[in-house]
Amino acid sequence: MATLFKAPDRASVQAFVATLRGKAIRKGEDGYETARKVYNGMIDRKPWMIVRCAGVADVMHSVNFAREQGLTLAIRGGGHSVPGFGTCDDGLVLDLGAMKGVRVDPKQRTARFQTGCTWGDADHAAHAFGLATPGGVISTTGVSGLTLGGGFGHLTRRYGLSCDNVVSVDVVTADGQFLTASASENSDLFWALRGGGGNFGVVTSLEFKLHPVSVVYAGPVFYPVEKATDALRLYRDVMSRAPRELSVFFAFLIVPPGPPFPESLHMKTVCGVMCVYSGDLTKGETAVKPFLDFGPPVFSHVGPIPYPMVQGMFDPLLPPGLQHYWKADFVKEISDTFIVEYAKYGKQVPTVNSAIHIYPLGGAVSDVGRSDTAFAWRDAGFVHIIAAVSSDASVMPKYRDWVRDFWTALHPCCAGGTYVNFLMEEGEERITASYQENYQRLAKIKQKYDPSNLFHVNQNIKPAP
């Protein structure tokens, strides 16, 4: 039987709130209903208090208070967690969304981003210097959350995962200490933070390596859905020999009703690819030519485009508050059986907001050893995601069943684990499989830095006994 929540006594609460520079919002207070809402509209939780942290001091005070009072603690950075890990019932939420400090060092080609930054913030800041670092495919995604789970995007095949580009991390641990983790300082913690999720502390900022990326050759190419099987074979064949500068993801989609898409395609189901070539622009057209020659395409819109515009291209389809249900897996190779099942179910993509995607890995990802960071799936060639997304809660049970059936059909063709940032609440076995042989090392580091499992509102790695 669940125990009833007992709030801390008034004197303790008053003393805690007095330490904060940010704002503390409790149930019943102005702004609470807005503050408690999270990205996934399926998540409806009611924390006892939400602290909008103004800086690191607020984080330290809040971690100490939560630990001393025995409160459930949830951490919200960019706020993009689909499982709803940025909130909880009854406990304390640390909302770091106001912590958006950025510092770019163009000479050293590094940048430090506070945890409230999204990839849109990061890309905008770095682009002014003709630089970028790998980070997601939606600009509203939080820098910290994506990176802690590994992090991949359009630049990953060329420059590695987001976590591979981290130089140092500032973090508040469960005992309230502020630490810096890097290759030379708290190196065990640094290892764990690069893929191990939010298990080890509250990350307050991350320092990244930057790379010369400004304008890329990019855009979507759509085909008739009837050609999906052949299009998938083409995708497999092209990506098997693609240069690292080329990143292409495959998708089934319902064409959005607006520009730049022709009215004749609005709300029609198609399949297609999203191409991004980050090398010499004069070679971009040649790199994407196989996708333009196939079909013929029913739509293509490929050419030079500033990298931040590519990152924000799909933002309008995924505003906060929609209902999300996701399942995903790593894929070592796209087999003929995988293609048959993917084409069968993909054609049933339910809504214009849904994401039925295959993302490429390989390239620079596989240059890093399986045990060099917490992210273990260095030999995966791809990761697929089935994300049913709708504004209508009443249809989600049906869409959830479709996602599960689709995933079940594909799973025997997949690698056995999944990308933790695509993982919803699927049980401890799936978490363990997603870390493979690195799990036990992560559990030992968890025992060192968070023996009481204060940070458990996440894809949780329990402390080693």
Image: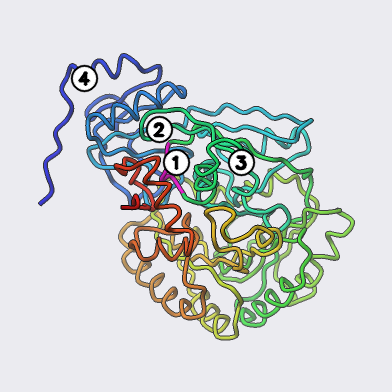
For marks 4 and 2, give the CA distance: 20 Å
- Write down the residue under mark 3: 183
**At 56% across and 53% down in the image, what residue appears?**
373
Answer yes or no: do the residues labelled 4 and 2 have beta carbons within 8 Å? no
Q: Is residue 343 above or below residue 15?
A: below
Hey, what amino acid is under mark 2? Asp
Location of mark 4 (residue): 12
The type of residue carrying mark 4 is: Ser
Mark before the other along the chain sequence, 2 or 1: 1
- Which comes sooner in the sequence, label 3 or label 2? 2
* Left or right position of 346 against 174: right
* Image x and y of residue 338, in percent: 55, 81
| Circle 1: residue type | Gly
> Cα distance, mark 3 to mark 2?
28 Å
Number of other residues with Cα within 10 Å of mark 3, as a class: few under 14, some 14 to 19, many 20 or more: few
Task: Please tell me whether residue 236 belongs to the stretch shown in magenta.
Answer: no
Say which label, 4 or 1, has the lower sequence index.
4
CB under 8 Å between discs 2 and 1: yes
